[in-house]
Amino acid sequence: MKDRAREPEPFTRFRDGTDGEDGAVAALFRAVSEPEALGASELARVRRRLARETRSRGRKRAREAIMIAAALLSGVGVAFGGWGIVEWTRSPSAKRESVKASAPPSLSASARPRRPQTSVSRAPGVSSAFAEPETTAAPKSRRPTPSAETSAAPRTVASVTAESALSRESQALTAALVALRRQRDPRAALAALDAYDAEFPNGALRLEARIARVDAWIAAGDCARALGAVDRLVDGAAPAAVQERALYARASCRLRVGNRPGAESDFRRYLASYPSGRYVDEVTKLLGTEALR
Amino acid sequence: MATPKSAGRFEYSELVGAKELELDRIYREHAALVSRWIRRLAGPDPALDVQDLLHEVFLVVEERLPEFRGEAKLTTWLYSIAVRVVRGARRKARLRRLLFRNTRPEVLFTPQSPETPLGALERERATALVYQILERLSERDRALLILFELEGLAGDEIAMILDLSPNSVWVGLGRARARFKKALLETYPDIDGEPWR
């Protein structure tokens, strides 16, 4: 890939700079090390993973193809069956028409509007041999058709929409987190989280948003509200990473509001539950200080 | 002459086999190179695993191989996939870091080992310093600088990889270089003292 200076380039690369203004930058870039490729055993490991996945994906695709073919075949079968039945029911009705045509005009006029109904629901006077196959065949012939082809298109559109919704959701949450972490503005973060909740009440990242809200309340000094929310996260069915973060947040909150026994119990629970967790160093340090006594 | 049924079966298996063989060939010939690019693009970020990213790149290659028509060089096409996969992984890692704020710095200097020769140590520190500054730039600036300054790619190749016009590459590079220098001088005002040494 290294194919420099095919055409004159407007810039000289930093590393090719001379001792002038960019001398130090040039020296810095010249000192940057070349990355090494993965070793043979690591490459082989990735290759095995790929082969495994290709095989399982191949099997999955074959299963899907069989199911689609079966659905199509049954759809075609039912459609043919339905068409046959319709044709079959039509011929005697045609006969009836010819009979009605010879009947007095008042009788044929009253019978005519009722005709379409007889094909949908069983009409009095029509034998079950005609009506029953039609009533059962009609929904069957409608059902398999979308499952085969038309449902595939909405699924793709839905997946694309879901992806863009997740991306928007992630952006909304990131805005709150940036306000909280980088700009250190918990009020702006809470406002952004309110906007997030309004737009994505059942969002995929709602647990993360709740944790961020707890952090924002703690940063804003509102530990009472944070404690109310964090209990549900610690003892609920949240993923381990969220529970870990929530437990640490609750311990910090309890410490801040002066509930030392509660904080100590949470910190000990943290160490027992997450011996290699992200906050082990801080918790161990805190447990060894006077802050908890 | 083969019966239509057996001919159909033969063709199908042949097609599947051809795709697998092609993928296998691409992997054998390029995986090591792609892993090196991934390392370059990801930088010394402990949250990004090169093996996982290589795996992800080749899953995309498998998916997109039928679309590849040879308009670009295979290596350029692979590079563009690697750039996108690493960019996606970095985005996820950044969101995770924002969510569960790490107490450690985002880019770590490799621990100094007494066994490391001085030159190698300097290279490691210079690499970490460059990536530390790159972290402060936008994804686009970062990608442009890595491809041009570190990988030494030509402008038209960068344009193909990043799906930009050659003009945008040069304009973007001019700005990215200026921002890099500004950020570097803000972080290390005494850059002439060569802080990585």
Image (cartoon, rainbow, N blue to C red):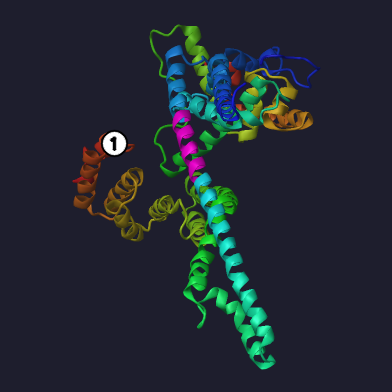
The reply to whether the magenta stretch includes residue A55 is yes
Residue type marked 1: Val
The one nearer the camera, A157 or A75, is: A75
For the point 44% across and 17% down, the residue is A44
Q: Which residues are magenta?
A: A54-67
Q: Which residue is mark 1?
A: A280
Q: Secondary structure at mark 1?
A: helix
Dot 1: chain letter:
A
- Main structural element of the magenta stretch: helix, strand or loop? helix
Q: Quadrant of residue B174?
A: top right
Image side of residue A105 versus residue A29, left or right: right
Q: How many marks?
A: 1
Q: Quadrant of residue A8?
A: top right
Q: Is residue A288 visible?
A: yes
Pinpoint residue A160: horizontal percent, then vertical percent.
58, 48
* Relative vertical location of residue A7 with respect to residue A189 in this rendering, above or below: above
